[in-house]
Structure formats: C-alpha cells, structure tokens
Amino acid sequence: MKVKELVCIGCPLGCNLKVEISEEGSMEVTGNTCPRGADYAEKELTDPRRIVTSSVRVSGGHLPCVSVKTETDIPKDKIFDCVKALKNVELLAPVKIGQIVAENVAGTGAAVIATKDIYVQ
Amino acid sequence: MKTEIAIIGGGPAGLAAAVAAREAGVEDILIIERDNELGGILNQCIHNGFGLHTFKEELTGPEYAGRYIEKVEELKIPYMLHTIVVDIAENKVITVMNKEQGMFQIEAKAIVLAMGCRERSRGALNIPGYRPAGVYSAGTAQRYVNMEGRMPGKKVVILGSGDIGLIMARRMTLEGAKVQVVAELMPYSGGLKRNIVQCLDDYDIPLKLSHTVVDIKGKKRVEGVTLAQVDENRRPIPGTEEFYECDTLLLSCGLIPENELSSQMGVELNPVTSGPVVNESLETNVEGVFACGNVLHVHDLVDYVSGEAKMAGENAAAYVQGTLMQAGKEIPLKGENGVRYTVPCTVDRDRMAEKQVVRFRVGNVYRDSFLCVYYNDKCISRVKKKVMAPGEMEQVILMKSKLEAFDGLESITIRIEQE
C-alpha cells in the first residue's frame, strides 16, 4: 500500500488529504471535509486537471482586455498550450459574460468563455 | 444632496451591503465608487475559487462581482462612479468629488464603510538599494496583466508569499515570464495552502521561507536583487546572500485596511487590524456608521466579506428605520495567547443574533493546539485544531442563548492552549 499526502485546492479551506492506494489501485481518501476533496485527490493522482484563467484582447471596449476561463477543467499538461492559443484571439466589444471566446482550446474539448462584460466605448 | 444610507466603496463589501439594505426595505441608498466600474478588486482577480460558500459554485473574481452588480442593477440601487470621497464629518456629511459635478456634499443618515484595503508599499518595507523602475506591488502587476494587457517584466522575483503574490507567480509564468523565486520573511507562508500548491508547486517555483531582499541592483531599471536568509529575529544572516538577476520585483507583503476617512471622522481603530473597532452589529463608535469587508479586517475569502457586508447593510437599514435596538451592556471580547484580535470587539446580548460569528487571526503557526473560549475565567469550549496559521482566518460561533444563561458575564476570551 502506498500513502500520498495532498493539499486540496477545491476551496480556500485547503484540507490536508491523505490518500491510501491499495495494491489493486483503489484509493481511500481521508482528511477531506467535503466530497470535493475525495474527488480532487483521485483525479490529482490519476488525471490532474485545472481550470485555466487568462485574459484576451478586446478592441473598442471600456477595457483593452477581457478575463476568460476554460468552461471545464483541462489536463494540467495542456495549460501552456491553452494560454498560448488564446494569444491569437482578439474580440470586438461588446463582450458578454459567458460568451464563448474559443472552442476546443488546444484540443482539450473545453471551450473558453468570457468572465466579464465589456461594453462599447 | 441627501441619502438615507451612503455606502463608501463599490467593491464586494459595498455591493453586498447595498443589496442587503435595499432588501431590508430602504429605498434611498447611494454607493460611491472611485473607479470607473463597480466590483472593486474582484475585477482584477481573474482566477477562479470564489463563491463556493455564497453561490455553491466556483467562480472567477469578475463573475462573482458580476452577480452582485446584476443585483444592484436589478434593484435599481443608485451608484456614482469615478467619484472619490475626500472627507466624512462626524455628523455624516460626506464631501465627494468627480469630474462632472466638481466638489459637493452628501448628507447621510447612516454610513457603511466599505473602502477595502491596500498593499504594503516598498517605502513601508524599508528595502535598501536604488529606486529603479521594475518594482511593483503584486496587485499593481495584477491590474496591468489582467485588465490592461501589459507585462511588467520578463524575469521576476517576488517578495512576500501573500495570496496575490502567489497568484501573480502563476499568472506571470503563464504569460511567458520566468518567475525565479518567492521569498518570504517569515518562517511560514502568508498565503493559503491551496495557492502554494496550484500557483507555485504546479510550476516548480521555489518558495524560500525566512528570506528577504537585502539589496536591489540597477539605477534606471531593476537588474537584480539580493536575497538573504534571516534569523529568528528577522535579521539577515551575513554570508547567506544570493544574487538573482531579474528585471522585476513584485511585493506581496501584506494588506492594510484603508481607514484615513474613518479616522478623520472619529472612528476608533484597532491597532492590530488597522480597522475600526466594531460591536456585534458591525457598528463603529460613531453611531450609525458601520464597517465591513477588508476595511474592517483583511479577509481570505470574498464569501465571508459578502456575509459580513450583508449584516452591516441590514443593520444600517435597521438603524435608519429606527428598529436597531439601543446599545446596552457591551461585553468585551478578548483575544489572548496567540489570538491577535477579534471582530467584533464587543457583543451586546440583547442585540446579537442567535449565532454570532467571531473571526480572528492567530499570530504564529500552531499545531495540535486547542482553541478555547472562556466566559469570564470559565472555559466553556475547547476544540482541538490540527493547524492554525496566520495566513488563514479562524472563527468561533457564540450562541445568544448560552451567553444569556451565563450569570454575571463580564468578558469573553478566546485563546490558544497547548495540551
């Protein structure tokens, strides 16, 4: 049996998780205060993923940038590809919160959406 | 100009207070905001992790702010943008200024202070060396990168492990900068553990505890900084100096509630938090003046700011409606033995809600210790905590019924005890 220790990143509580991995590969998670912790631990040890947030350029808006995020989490090793792909995106104001900015970013299947309203100025 | 409730600041605290006051039935409310949009600092906090408590989902900062801005718009709560408050008099006359109307005054019946906090600056940190370009507070860099689309530099050293510094370590890395190291003066991190994991560990950025900047090299632009290890008295240890070539130094060394307006109007401040001394109703020593959010004490979670601000907004509403009970006997709350402060500072058993949340920070890292609550000198609760750290706010809940049942209650003390 292997034991791994993790800090949950699900919320700011940051629970200290202990994961016991049996010979067959089944995992038992302790130290979590909510079900999110157990999900995180299993995912982190098998297929680590992150929501990626960034910003993309906007022309004609009240700000030159709009904040964006991947709608779902994407594999950790695709984070840089995702941010790189967003470098070539330029939007035209207005931008609505929730608007799709890029589809299937870096081949992850995840869409990138705006997280802020940008109005025309 | 007159208003029933003036809310100073249109960030998360001001927005939640305004919504709560309107929902409590006050029509005449005015939010005064100095920036060109509502939402405050959340607008530049584009990372996710907000709202798990308030909305039961994970949002980014702008999305979280957006939810409240939408409510403010729906409820048609008036707000002024680009308008700065320059003075508040003790009689609640607010002097404000903007481009269109110049300088004018607003008479308020109640005021909610929701100005937030600001970052400790280089000047306040006493870092030796030249004063070249390339030294930024982490929050300034955050605004540049996330809202204005500018990169402050390419090779970065970060001093201080506050959450904004950690978040910016990741953000600058993603945008192509090389973040070489985060140095922290204290032997523990000032930020949340989750941010160490997802912002530093994920990108192999080293965190050097008990280290500080002892020199900044470069006359026009930063060329590098020298880090040194510090001893237990936070003095640099000679011989441990290490030079890092860089063009940018970010500072994330603590946040200070912004209370110049509060103290000008005679609001008493707590020297530990630099925020107002408030009672259970979040009312300051000036009647009808309430405080909430980071102007009161620096929070880790915006969700808690919103909760606190809701309470301040409701109490301000009750005050102008004449339903806020007269203050009676205030029982002092004391933090001792590692508990640095408490918010609120006093409780009135008649005015308190059935459950009163008391929030505080500890002064050091405590492992396997007990968090104890005393009524007078009687210990009434003793809870074992695995870890308590200065970077993470703690809380206890006081029950009105228990406080009322305790004869001769003169003080409540929260302290940390070992075995």
Image: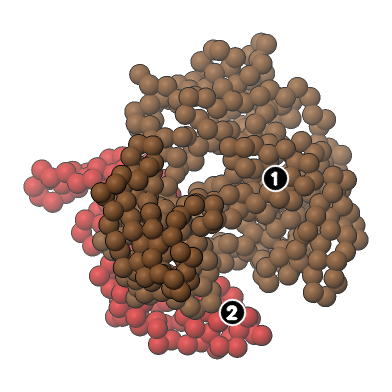
Chain colours: A red, B brown
User: Share a chain, discs 1 and 2?
Assistant: no
Coordinates of residue B226 in the picture (x, y in percent): 33, 58
Coordinates of residue B44 in the picture (x, y in percent): 53, 67
Q: Residue at x 28, y 73 (%)?
A: A78
Amino acid tagged 1: Ala
Residue B271's mark? none
Chain assignment, label 2: A
Front-most of residues B122 and B10: B122
Question: Is the residue marked by circle 2 packed among few (<14), some (14-19), or many (20+) residues within 10 Å?
Answer: some
- The answer to whether residue A69 of the structure is visible from this angle is no
Q: Residue at x 49, y 41 (%)?
A: B393
Question: Is the residue marked by circle 1 packed among few (<14), some (14-19), or many (20+) residues within 10 Å?
Answer: many
- The answer to whether residue B417 of the structure is visible from this angle is yes
Amino acid tagged 2: Leu
Determine the CA span between mark 1 and mark 2. 31 Å
Residue A63's mark? 2
Point out the image quarter for the N terminus of chain B: bottom right
Front-most of residues A29 and B131: B131
Q: Secondary structure at mark 2?
A: loop
Residue placed farthest to the left in the image? A23
Q: Are marks 1 and 2 in contact (CB under 8 Å)?
A: no
| Residue beneath disc 1 | B291
Left or right placement of residue B266 versus residue A16 in this view: right
